[in-house]
Image: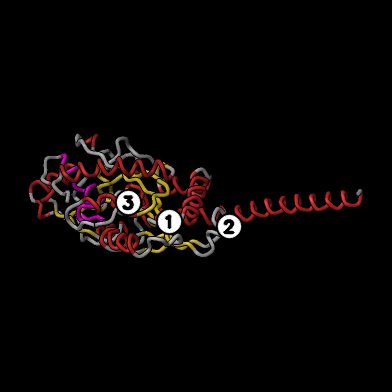
Amino acid sequence: MKRILLICLAIVMAAVLTACQGETSGTTEAEGTSGYPESNITIVAPSGAGGGWDLTARAIAKVMSETGLVEQPITVENRAGGGGAVFMAEYATKEVENDYMLMAKSPPIIINNLKAEGNSPYGYKDTTPLAQLTRDYGAIVVKADSKFNTLTDLLDAIKADPTSITMAGGSAPGSMDHLVGILPAYGYGIDPKIVKYVSYDGGGEAIAALLGGNADAIATDASAIGEYVKSGDVKVLAVSSTERLSGELEEVPTFQELGIDAEFTIWRGLFGPKNMSEEAVNYWSTKLSEMAVSEEWTAELERNGWQNEYKNAEDFTKFLEEQETVVSELLEALDMHK
C-alpha cells in the first residue's frame, strides 16, 4: 500500500510540475511573440530634401539609431510630389498594412484633404497617428539684398500690383506654405486669391528658387531658414508665432506685432499606415515616448530651432480632430474649401 501511495504521489507531482512548466512556457511564448521589427524601417518625407518633413524624418532616424532605441536600420526616403499629396495617395492605398513604412507629416495632411484646389481624397483618418513631436512656425523670407525690408513693404507692393510679386513655397496651392504666405495678406486687407503663388516640392526647392531670383519672397518653416539667416543669404520679414522666437530669429517681428491679426502653428508628427498592427503601434508608441525625453532628441530640437511638443497617439488623434475644425474654418474664410 505504501508503495502504491508513493507511486500516486509521484504521478501527482509530475503532473503538477508539467502544468507549471506549461504555464511558464506559455507565458514566455506570449511575451516573446512580438518579433517586430524584424527588418529595415523606412520613414518617408513626402517632399524633397531640406524641408521640415525631411529634417524631422532624419532627426527621428538619427536619434533612434544613435540611442539604440531601435536596433533595426532606419532609412529616410524622399517622395516628393503635389505638396505631399502624391505619396499620401500611395500610402493610403498601397501601403495600408506596411508596418515598416512610416511617414513624417504636418498640417498639409489635413489641409490637402479639405481644400478645393488640388484636393487630396486622403487625410489623417487614412493613417494611424503615432505621435506629435514638435511645434514650429511659418516665416516670410526674402533675399538679403531684397528691396523689401519689412513685411508691410512687401504687402504694399502686392496691393499696388499683385502680378509684380511672386510668392513661393514648398507646398501646393492651398496647402501649408501657401496659407502661411497669404495669411498676412488676408489680414492686411488683400484678397488672398490675387496673390501670385508658385509651389515647389519642399522647402529646399523653394529656398533655391528665392536665392536663384525666381521668387520675390517665400513662405517657409521658421526652423528651416536659420542657417540661411546666419550665412547672410536671406532676411526674415516676419514669423507667424504669437511671440518672438529665439536664436537666429530673435529680432524678427511677429505678424501680430505688425498689426496683422494672424498666427499659424506648424506641428509635426509621425504616422503609420491605416491598418498598422497593434504590435507595431505599441512598439512605436513606446519608442517615441522614450525618444521624446532623451537628451539626444532635446539636442536635435535645439539644433533645428524646434519647440518640443510631444503628444501620444491618443492625444495626437484628438488634436488632429480639433485641427481639422480650425483648418476647415480658415479655408472657408479664404474661399478655398472644397
Question: In this rendering, would 264 be left or right of 279?
Answer: left
Q: Earlier in the sequence, mark 1 or mark 3?
A: 3
Spatial CA span between label 3 and label 2? 30 Å
Q: Quadrant of residue 205?
A: bottom left
Q: Nearer the viewer, residue 62 or 143?
A: 62
Q: Mark 1 sits on what residue?
A: 276
Was residue 312 drawn as part of the magenta stretch in this picture? no
At 29% from the left and 35% from the top, the residue drawn is 242
The disc placed on residue 33 is: 2
Is label 3 in a helix, a strand or a loop? helix
What amino acid type is highlighted by mark number 3?
A: Tyr
Q: Mark 3 sits on what residue?
A: 124
Q: Which residues are magenta?
A: 168-187
What amino acid type is highlighted by mark number 2?
A: Thr
- Name the spot of residue 111 as percent of width and height, x first: 25, 50
Q: Earlier in the sequence, mark 3 or mark 2?
A: 2
Q: Residue furthest right?
A: 2
Q: Quadrant of residue 57?
A: bottom left
What amino acid type is highlighted by mark number 1?
A: Met
Whether residue 145 is visible here, answered yes or no, is no
Q: Residues within 10 Å of mark 3 (few under 14, many from 20)?
A: many
